[in-house]
Image: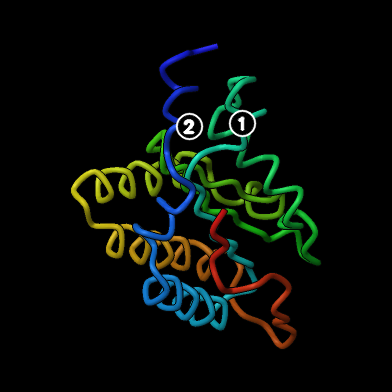
Amino acid sequence: MNITRLMKHLLTPPWLARRRFGRALIDEIGRAVAASESRHRGELRFIVEGPLPIAQAWRGVSARQRAAELFASQGVWDTEENSGILIYLQLVDRRVEILADRGIAARVPQAEWDAICRAMEAAFKAGDYRGGALTAVARASELLVEHFPAGANNANELPDRPLLL
């Protein structure tokens, strides 16, 4: 257990996520996700989390492990074509993780998603939360259009509005 990390999660107020990602930005990201999904058969889920739940911070759960947990609990894995993508922001640790379901992972290497994550982290470090988030949605959309273009049946299976935890 990393005591410094644990203390950061314990002492960071839960409203941190709402301060960085206010209603206007959440709405804008939701519109960007909806517009993106009209162009491909993938499903994007965007989740922003301030501090980890205490039990997870105590156990030393990494941002990647937390993203995997949310990938399952939010049903990102449960799309008809296995084409769900989770964009997860862990604000206290300043980490971004993108998890792709097996249908996407078979076509898009993880290195592509990791490059988007690092670009988002760089934008956030510079204080550009809006630009980092919207650029990530746009880049993910490009990859999904290339590998999962929209078809006749393009159901919206996951909420477009980002989830703040």
Residue lying at 75% horizontally and 53% vertically, measured from the top left:
77
Helix, strand or loop at disc 1?
helix
Q: Nearer the viewer, residue 73 or 100?
A: 73
Q: Amino acid at mark 2?
A: His
Residue lying at 57% horizontally and 53% vertically, measured from the top left:
165
* Residue 54 image label: 1
Q: Nearer the viewer, residue 27 or 118?
A: 27
Percent of width and height locating residue 32: 44, 76
Residue lying at 50% horizontally and 40% vertically, measured from the top left:
51
Residue labelled with disc 2: 9
Percent of width and height locating residue 44: 58, 64
Horizontal side of residue 8 vs 53, given as left or right:
left
Which residue occupies the extreme bottom position in the image?
A: 152
- Mark 2 touches mark 1? (CB < 8 Å): yes
Q: Residues within 10 Å of mark 2 (few under 14, many from 20)?
A: many
Percent of width and height locating residue 4: 41, 17
Which residue occupies the extreme left position in the image?
A: 126
Q: Earlier in the sequence, mark 2 or mark 1?
A: 2
Q: Residues within 10 Å of mark 1 (few under 14, many from 20)?
A: few
Relative vertical location of residue 165 with respect to residue 66 in this rendering, above or below? below
